[in-house]
Image (cartoon, helix red, strand yellow):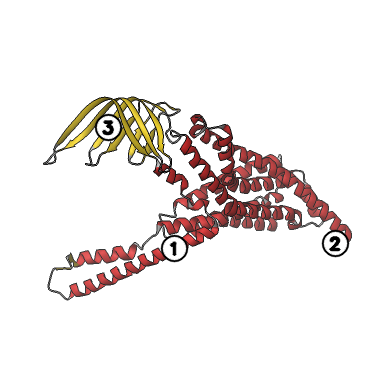
Amino acid sequence: MRGGKGDGTRLTLVHRYIAREFLLSFLVAFLFFFFIFFINQILLYAQRILLKQVPIRQMLTLVALSMPQILLYTIPFSTLSGASMVIGNLSSNHEIIAMRALGISLFQMLRSVIISALVLSVITFTIADSVLPVSHLQFKRLYTDLLRTLPTMELTSYSVNEVGDVVIVTQEVQDGYLENPVLFTTNNSGEQVFISAQSGTLELIDLQRFIYKLELWEVSILSSEREAGGTGGFRYGQGESMIYYLDFSSQVEQVRNVSPSQMSSRDLIDQIRIRMEDHEKAISQRSVLLEQVLRDIEQAKHSDETEYAGLSLSDLYDRKASLEQTPPVNFYLQYYRAELHKKFALSASALILTLISFPLSFVNIRHGRLFGFGLSLLVAALYWAMLFVAQTQIIRTNIHPLFLMWAPNLLILSISMLLIMRLRQS
């Protein structure tokens, strides 16, 4: 009977059935995770943009342009949840036992899940490598246009805002009007200046350079006064009005700049090549310094002087040890490498995370779909935590980011394979 026409029909029905159940579970999980990330994004923009009376249409456009970043995590976690839910449901209904009794292997049963997870991994990579850079570019353009039309969009009510070298403490900020603004800055002489006013208005006067005119009323000014000999006092003044010019170009540059997480893999590789050249130069310079220190040590040993090149022999040994123990670390090289490998690792996680749900097929559980969803939330949280820890280590260690970014995937894969092998042998 095995290998006959009936077997092919039976497997086709099994594949269709499991694929339909997986897609349904994936959709439910996707809506759950997407809703969580989406609400978080809406609240963020509501705080920063909607309260500034930005048109709803433009705010929703900004939210839509930020969706690719959300999908990078939503798709892998939804794939994990979908697989866990469908396998848990099949196990609780004893359908897996029935299919295995008919001679259908575990791989044949779950082939449609594996193929679906592989397709979703490819989709995740496409979003990370192609869609995200384009959407981020459109996001920057729209956000820059909003900065031109809404001068106070980067000033948040009841907060401390930094504009260039000026710190502005605000109360209510609305429609270009500032209530009780306070400014901290430094003048050309290096003296600290404190400016407070009862009210003020902010107006864009240079569209190209993003220069704004801050007009203040009922102004008080307190500045430090330096005198010869290191002593100093304070100067105090008052006025009915004052005009202060603010340079918002630094805020615009922060929006315009493309971070490594928004670059394509090709752009990241180009940046890595540039940073690698700088890193090799730093290594070469370190080698030259180390060779010089070794020569100084040898000459100091044969010299009657207690010091050589301005350093004692013990100081020279300390400098040699410092050079040997602290190899140069290029932060930007580590950062770009980490983002490149994260792009691939996060895409592959849609498939790898699915594998840890397979051991459920060997266990008879009640409320399988609910149990599978709960398990997927636990695994997703652990994966997120491991990825976060790996990212924090890229600037603290000389370990290649490839190992750090792929460590969560490798750990999940190893645990999955170990559980499957042990359960099959039991």
Splitting the image into 4 quarters, where does residue 230 fall? top left
Is 425 or 377 nearer to us in this picture?
377
- Residue name at image x 46 percent, y 49 percent: 257
Mark 1, other Cα within 10 Å: few <14 / some 14–19 / many ≥20: few
**Where's residue 339, x and y in %?**
50, 55
Alpha carbon distance from label 3 to label 1? 43 Å
Q: Earlier in the sequence, mark 2 or mark 1?
A: 2
- Residue indicated by mark 3: 194
Is 169 or 77 nearer to us in this picture?
169
Q: Is residue 354 left or right of residue 107?
A: left
Mark 3, other Cα within 10 Å: few <14 / some 14–19 / many ≥20: some
- Residue indicated by mark 1: 274
Q: Is residue 417 left or right of residue 323?
A: right
Splitting the image into 4 quarters, where does residue 294 fall? bottom left
Alpha carbon distance from label 2 to label 1? 59 Å
Alpha carbon distance from label 2 to label 3? 87 Å
Is 242 or 127 nearer to us in this picture?
242
* 377 lies above or below 355: above
Secondary structure type for disc 1: helix
- Residue indicated by mark 2: 2
Secondary structure type for disc 3: strand
Q: Is residue 292 left or right of residue 114?
A: left
Q: Earlier in the sequence, mark 3 or mark 1?
A: 3
Q: Is residue 180 left or right of residue 145?
A: left
* 226 lies above or below 317: above
**Where's residue 200, x and y in %?**
36, 27
Is 363 or 238 nearer to us in this picture?
238
**Where's residue 272, x and y in %?**
47, 61
Residue type marked 2: Arg
